[in-house]
Image (cartoon, helix red, strand yellow):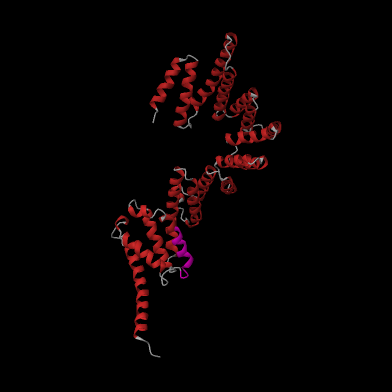
């Protein structure tokens, strides 16, 4: 068969085109892997042009090496702070797609391990873009970026990301918060339920999930979540308060107290049960019974400073209730009587706070300074100016 001169030239050109694309891909590799220059100094003008060419050419469009070097290029672009990163705002997402395609098409496992390693850097990039979007209140974008990073955690086999506090749990929390802020309750519930299934120790995960169930008027599910939370963090005040709130919503406050009564009878030395019952009594405005339980806790364990602190706060809340009730009341005899009550409550509260301030060696300095600020105001109200000056000096000496 005779081949025309034109056909021969066409075949030669087709072969040249295929080889040219292979050469272009090799040029990308050399430029990206050149260890003699920093990432900021690479030839991104040509790299981006080459990346476009090899992606659309039939000979390289599904080559795992093409996908790998495309991923590497856009990962580097995402880390720049210049016109190339500005012109390619989706660089980190393009990199994600490229590395995944490299793994998917790499039948001979030539770039799979390198792609997985680089996907850890993509995860960091997605977390950063997600967090930036979250701070800008672009919660939809934030959720998408956190969600995209989540599957990449499986490649963190050496705990490199975990050592830098980036874990699947962190991403799921941020997904949940993003969805909650965006009014997407179903997405938030799904993310939070994943964390609850893993028995996270973070109490706010349980309380936030319970709040979403309460928003949907499902008190049964809300109570199940709180019960699960208390199994891993039974002393958390937020969980105890919410459990009480749910029982009250269900009209079961006496049932809760009965539960705690039975638990205390079975284990009378367990301070946690007294703590839960004290908070329950507080919620029901039975402060005398709450005070008795707080005292019992401190009798069993004098270093249970949360009990002392809560008891002090309880007295301050009583003062707040009295002040609210006095609103608009101008009769001197009534005001004088209430002032005497308030004075006595301040005296009761300050004793508890002094215990915490003077004896709790484990209190964080930030919390101690905050407590000192409260005590300073109380000493002024009680006209104990020497103590007032002591607290004032402490606060000034420990300001950041």
Q: Which residues are magenta?
A: 96-108
Figure check: 388 above or below 18: above
**From what the image shows, is residue 356 above or below residue 200?**
above
Relative to 319, is 73 above or below?
below
Q: Position of residue 100 (x, y in %)?
A: 47, 61
Camera-nearest residue between 278 and 274: 278
Q: Mainly helix, strand or loop, the magenta region?
A: helix
> In the visual, does 16 lie left or right of 137?
left
> Whole-percent x and y of residue 63?
43, 69
Q: Residue placed at 60% from the left, 37% from the top? A: 239
Residue 303 visible in image: no
Q: Nearer the viewer, residue 108 or 136?
A: 136
Residue 185 placed where, x, y %? 58, 45
Closest to the observer, 33 or 323: 323
User: Is residue 263 found left or right of 307 in the rendered image?
Assistant: right
Residue 327, quarter of the rendered image: top right
- State which quarter of the image contains the C terminus: top left
Identity of the residue drawn at 34% across and 71% down: 23
Identify whether 157 is placed above or below 200.
Answer: below
Quadrant housing residue 314: top right
Give the position of the N terminus as an image quadrant.
Answer: bottom left
Residue 72 inside the magenta-drawn segment: no
- Residue at the far top: name it: 333
């Amino acid at each position: 068969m005779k081949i025309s001169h034109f056909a021969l030239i066409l075949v030669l050109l087709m072969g040249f085109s295929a080889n040219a694309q292979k050469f272009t891909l090799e040029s990308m590799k050399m430029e990206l892997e050149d260890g003699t220059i920093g990432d900021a100094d690479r030839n991104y003008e040509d790299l981006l042009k080459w990346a476009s060419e090899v992606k659309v050419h039939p000979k390289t469009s599904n080559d795992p090496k093409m996908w790998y070097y495309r991923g590497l290029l856009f990962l580097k672009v995402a880390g720049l702070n210049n016109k190339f990163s500005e012109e390619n705002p989706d660089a980190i997402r393009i990199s994600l797609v490229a590395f995944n395609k490299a793994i998917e098409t790499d039948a001979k496992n030539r770039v799979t391990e390198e792609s997985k390693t680089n996907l850890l850097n993509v995860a960091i990039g997605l977390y950063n873009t997600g967090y930036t979007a979250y701070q800008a209140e672009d919660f939809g974008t934030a959720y998408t970026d956190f969600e995209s990073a989540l599957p990449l955690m499986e490649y963190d086999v050496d705990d490199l990301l975990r050592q830098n506090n980036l874990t699947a749990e962190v991403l799921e929390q941020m997904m949940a918060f993003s969805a909650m802020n965006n009014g997407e309750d179903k997405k938030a519930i799904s993310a939070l339920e994943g964390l609850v299934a893993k028995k996270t120790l973070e109490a706010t995960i349980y309380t936030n999930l319970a709040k979403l169930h309460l928003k949907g008027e499902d008190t049964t599910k809300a109570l199940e979540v709180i019960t699960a939370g208390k199994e891993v963090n039974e002393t958390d005040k937020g969980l105890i308060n919410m459990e009480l709130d749910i029982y009250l919503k269900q009209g079961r406050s006496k049932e809760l107290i009965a539960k705690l009564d039975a638990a205390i009878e079975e284990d009378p030395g367990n301070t946690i049960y007294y703590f839960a019952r004290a908070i329950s009594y507080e919620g029901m405005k039975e402060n005398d019974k709450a005070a008795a339980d707080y005292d019992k806790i401190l009798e069993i364990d004098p270093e249970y400073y949360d009990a002392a602190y809560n008891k002090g706060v309880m007295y301050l809340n009583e003062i707040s209730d009295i002040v609210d009730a006095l609103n608009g009341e101008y009769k001197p005899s009534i005001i004088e009587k209430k002032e005497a009550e308030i004075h006595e409550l301040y005296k009761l509260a300050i004793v508890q706070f002094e215990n915490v301030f003077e004896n709790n060696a484990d209190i964080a300095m930030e919390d101690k300074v905050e407590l000192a600020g409260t005590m300073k105001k109380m000493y002024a109200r009680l006209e104990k100016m020497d103590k007032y000056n002591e607290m004032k000096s402490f606060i000034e000496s420990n300001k950041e």
